[in-house]
Structures are given as C-alpha cells and as structure tokens.
Image (spheres, grey):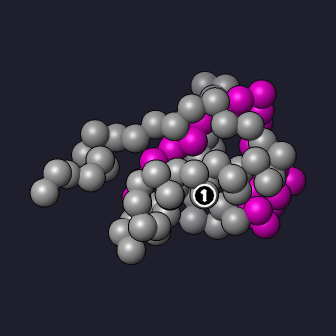
Amino acid sequence: MNKYEFSLILKGTSELTEDVANELFRAGCDDGTPGTCNGVFSIDFHREAKSLEAAINSAIENVKAARCDVERVEIAAEAMPQPA
C-alpha cells in the first residue's frame, strides 16, 4: 500500500473544538491533522491505501461518520502519483 497526502476542506464548520476533534478521531481520522485558518476548517491526511481514490473516499466516509460535511478535496501537485 502507498501513503497519500491530501486535504479535505469541510463546509459549515469553521471552528475546531475539542469535541469535533475527538469525534473525528473516533470516526477514523486518526491519520489526519485538523485545523482552521482564516475561517476555513480542513483536515490534512497522510493515509495508506491501495489508490489515491480509495484513500480519499475512505477519508470522506470517516468525516461523514463524524457528522461533518466535505466541501472539496485539495491535493498538492507534488503529492500526485507520477505516471510510470
């Protein structure tokens, strides 16, 4: 398995509270680092999976299980898998 780095930007939530952080951790986001910047709540993930798509989909499922909604996914260009 490979490790993939990406961020999920959450919508409707602009404050990171201890309760929200604990809920995310319990929902399986223990490989993510939540934070806020300029009113934007994001979680930076370093997730192991068979593919980038699988990593992102499982992270979105975990975030939804914590009763949060995902607005978008961000991936740094250098984190994208390189063609063989």
In terms of depth relative to the viewer, which is nearer, 19 or 62? 62
Residue 21 on image: x %, y %: 76, 55
Residue at 41% x, 54% y is 52
In the image as oriented, which residue stretches furthest toward the left? 84
Residue at 75% x, 57% y is 24
- Residue 9 counted in the magenta span: yes
Residue 30 on image: x %, y %: 64, 66
- Residue 20 counted in the magenta span: yes
Residue 84 on image: x %, y %: 13, 57
Residue at 82% x, 58% y is 23
Which residues fall within the magenta stretch?
A: 4-27
Residue at 25% x, 46% y is 78
Q: Is residue 37 visible?
A: no
| Drawn side of residue 26 relative to residue 3, left or right | right
Residue 48 on image: x %, y %: 46, 68
In terms of depth relative to the viewer, which is nearer, 14 or 53? 53
Residue 11 position (above or below residue 53):
above
| Drawn side of residue 78 relative to residue 19, left or right | left
Q: Secondary structure at mark 1?
A: helix
Give, as a three-letter code, the residue at label 1. Answer: Ser
Q: Which residue is mark 1?
A: 58
**Quadrant assignment, res 75:** top left
In terms of depth relative to the viewer, which is nearer, 80 or 46? 80
Position of the N terminus, as image quadrant, is: bottom left
